[in-house]
Amino acid sequence: MAKSKDLDFDTKVIHVGGDPDPVTGSIMPPIHQTSTYVQKAPGVHYGYEYTRSHNPTRDRLEECLASLENAKFCLVTSSGMAAVSLILHTAPKGANIVCGDDVYGGTNRLMRTVFDKQIDFTFVDTTDLKKVEQSLKDKKPYLLWLETPTNPLLKVSDIQKISKLCKKYKALLVVDNTFMSPYFQRPLDLGADLVVHSVTKYLNGHSDVVGGAMMTNNKNLHEKLWYLQNSMGPSQSPFDSWLVLRGLKTLAIRMQRHEENAIKVVKYLEGHKKVEKVIYPGLKSHPQHSLAKKQMSGFGGMITFYIKGGLKDARSFLKKVKVFKLAESLGGVESLSNHPGIMTHASVPLEMRKKLGISDTLIRLSVGIESPKDLIADLEQALK
Ligand SMILES: *Cc1c(COP(=O)(O)O)cnc(C)c1O
């Protein structure tokens, strides 16, 4: 078969890491559900010693995910937060880290309440390049943590320009690419040093696995992360890796449909009198619409909107939706609705939420791949 770098994305998701089993020819990879591997003599083995360190099924997934982000290296972890933790553990004691002010609630919590003992964190609005440069100049951070588009407000930051600033001030640039998936955005191509994903979301896509991944072209950083993963233990199980390999095969067509459906839902919501404002990077009214068009090859399946009224109107809507199941998480084939203030972002301090606009009337939708007609009918009955 052609070298993976010569294949199109839609072929890579199906074939990279997917060579047939050499012993039986089975077209789907075996699940190497084993903790250990027999050695021929002490220290003489097939390259595998223990599954925390390496596993053939996880290797296949890492090979595929690396190729999707145009990376040389990938590590797959037992959750997105495990990947975030390993990355933070690479920071030297007393280091500074600059982080976007509107990131995943769990990332914010991990930084402010767990890693705050050994790292000094500064939160900045990464859509403002002047503020980004000032923070790099003042703090000389070990790394800058970027989420774009952000969760839940879908603010878009300029990866290429920020990567240039990071190089100037010798900070690593880490991008959490969970919301776009490599189908719509490839941060390493834009100058980032490391990409992190919650595999739980679009990459797996079927809401049946929790997992994380880190991709990079920096061998030294990759080796540090592998050392930490092996020492601390959050490697993904073989069965979960196998499920993600299976889910990945449809990533390209799922992302297309997520976006098509999201655009239809956005149009519907924009025309509804009970909706105050719709936030979606594909809208001309989005403050970073032109950057989004340049940096991403699509606008994704996440929508945020403000419902008119107060908390009781938001609650009533979220109790009435039937197809849009009320649940945390995102990126699965099924549509989900969420109240960030009460659910995913409750751990973010109230003051910070207020400043950002995570209010009582903010609702986040993860638009699935169901029939758009049924999705819109569901919203229609819930907004009544
Ligand atoms: C869900 C999520 C995470 C955390 O991943 P888990 O798999 O839930 O541990 C990190 N970043 C973003 C943007 C997420 O949506």
Image (spheres, rainbow, N blue to C red):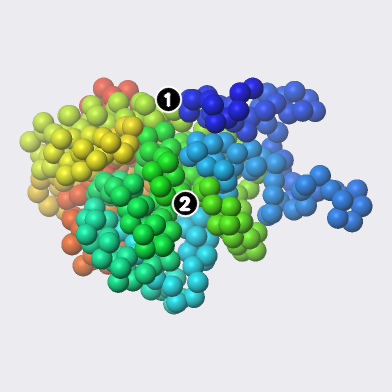
Question: Mark 2: few, some, or many residues within 10 Å (few <14, many ≥20)?
Answer: many
Residue at 91% in and 48% down: 40
Given residues 254 and 324, the one toward you in this image is 254
Q: What quarter of the picture does the N terminus occupy?
A: top right
Which kind of residue does numbered mark 2 sit on? Leu
Residue at 13% in and 39% down: 285
Q: Secondary structure at mark 1?
A: helix
Q: What quarter of the picture does the C terminus occupy?
A: top left
Residue 194 is marked as 2
> In the rendered image, which quarter is residue 181 located in?
top left
Given residues 90 and 86, the one toward you in this image is 90
Residue 237 is marked as none
State the image coordinates of residue 138 (x, y, percent, origin top left): 30, 71
In this view, 338 is above or below 110:
above
The reply to whether residue 270 is visible in this rendering is yes
Residue at 33% in and 48% down: 159
Disc 2 versus disc 1: nearer the observer: 2
The reply to whether residue 338 is visible in this rendering is no
In this view, 277 is above or below 272:
below
Q: CA distance from mark 2 to mark 1?
A: 26 Å
Residue at the far right in the pictured view = 41
State the image coordinates of residue 193 (x, y, percent, origin top left): 46, 52
Q: Which residue is mark 1?
A: 253
Q: Earlier in the sequence, mark 2 or mark 1?
A: 2
> In the rendered image, which quarter is residue 370 located in?
top left
User: Quick check: 319 left or right of 202?
Assistant: left
Which kind of residue does numbered mark 1 sit on? Ile
State the image coordinates of residue 179 (x, y, percent, origin top left): 36, 43
